[in-house]
Image: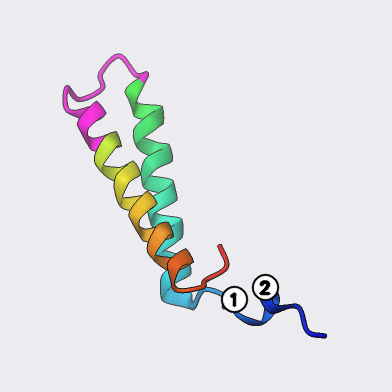
Amino acid sequence: MQDTSESCTKSLNTAEQAHLTYLRQRVDNLQEERFRRDARLSINNEIHTAVEELRQFTSNLRREGRRI
């Protein structure tokens, strides 16, 4: 019997992987900036937006059966 969880998942293509990497790095960089003395006043809003964009992107990929 074949494992159905393995057979219905797909790996990310190159563009999806690059976009996922970009979104993760963006969140990381913004979170690091938050603790600097010279952080922008809008940094918390930017972090919230970046996290939501990452969450939405990964949620959509998982819904399509992508393995993240």
Q: Viewed as shown, does residue 58 lie left or right of 67?
A: left
Badge 1 vs badge 2, beta-carbon distance below 8 Å: yes
Q: Quadrant of residue 34?
A: top left
In this rendering, is residue 39 above or below 9? above
Magenta span: 35-46
The residue depicted at 49 percent of the width and 78 percent of the height is 13
Q: Nearer the viewer, residue 47 or 8?
A: 8
Location of residue 23 in the rendering, given as x and y in whole percent from the top left corner: 38, 53
Amino acid carrying label 1: it is Thr
Q: Nearer the viewer, residue 39 or 2?
A: 2
Q: CA distance from mark 1 to mark 2?
A: 7 Å
Furthest-top residue in this view: 37
Residue holding disc 2: 5
Majority secondary structure of magenta residues: loop
Picture quadrant where residue 45 is located: top left
Q: Horizontal and vertical percent for residue 4?
A: 69, 78
The amino acid on which the numbered mark 2 sits, given as a three-letter code, is: Ser
**Vertical position of residue 2 compared to residue 29: above or below:** below
Q: What residue is pinned by disc 1?
A: 9
> Where residue 3 sits: x, y (%)?
76, 78
Q: Identify the residue at the far front of this view.
A: 1
The total number of labels drawn is 2
| Residue 40 located within the stretch drawn in magenta | yes
Which of 21/57 is in front? 57
Disc marking residue 27: none
Tell me the quadrant of the picture where the N terminus can be found: bottom right
* Residue 51: % across, % down: 34, 42
Secondary element type, mark 2: helix
Dot 1 lies on which element? loop
